[in-house]
Amino acid sequence: EIVVTQSPGTLSLSPGERATLSCRASQISNTYLAWFQQKPGQPPRLLIYDISTRASGVPDRFSGSGSGTDFTLTISRLEPEDFAVYYCQQYGISPRTFGQGTRVE
Amino acid sequence: EVQLLESGGDLVQPGGSLRLSCAASGFSFSNQGMSWVRQAPGKGLEWVSGISGSGSTTYYTDSVKGRFTISRDNSKNSLYLQMNSLRAEDTAIYFCAQDQGWLHANWGQGTLVTVSS
């Protein structure tokens, strides 16, 4: 099973600041790495797929990058609605595995 | 607009069974793979099972193999998860997700399964 590790566990920032979330996967297939945002009481929402492609309707302050085994989600300027938990997932190798999440507070 | 509506979650005793359903609309259901993903209370996400558009290929995480069965009825635009021999550690919100390839593109609101005596 592919292990996916996210850091930090919690990121404490203020609106307007830049957020940098890290994700390390022991292996990925092709570019099959995604990021999801989850707010309390809601299902996850797809933000980024294929490492760096924004999903439909996702603001351009969200960007994904990385290669090999190390990946990053960057939120250029935090808006109040961006405070949430973020998960990365490798979806190219079964079982598809998630990181443990990073809370942005 | 893609809509996914899960149902069937309940309180069940250890060793019991439950069948979850997911009603899909807003896309060509038979052409898309589907998945179940769960989230234990206060915990992270765990992919549980997936199925191809035709239903001919299924996938499971190791912890549910032999206990859970995923299936679909394309004539009813519905996805199912039959859960047998339930354990306390199966307690979670179960989300159904529309897959594009293996990417969970859209998610339902989830249904809560509680396994407890």
Image (tube, coloured by chain):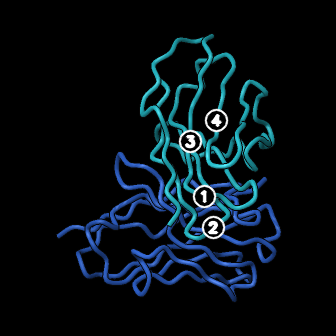
Chain colours: A cyan, B blue
Callout 2, which amino acid?
A: Ile
Q: Quadrant of the C terminus of chain B?
A: bottom left
Q: Which residue is mark 2?
A: A93
Q: Residue at x 41, y 79 (%)?
A: B83
Q: Crowdedness of circle 2 by 10 Å Cα count: few (<14), some, many (20+)?
A: some
Question: Helix, strand, or loop for circle 2?
Answer: loop
Q: Which residue is mark 3?
A: A23
Question: Helix, strand, or loop for circle 4?
Answer: strand
Marks 4 and 2, how far apart at CA: 20 Å
Q: Earlier in the sequence, mark 1 or mark 2?
A: 1
Q: Residue at x 45, y 78 (%)?
A: B19
The foreground one among A33 and B34 is: A33
The reply to whether label 1 and label 3 mark residues of one chain is: yes
Q: Which residue is mark 1?
A: A27
Question: Helix, strand, or loop for circle 1?
Answer: loop
- Disc number lying in front (1 or 3): 1
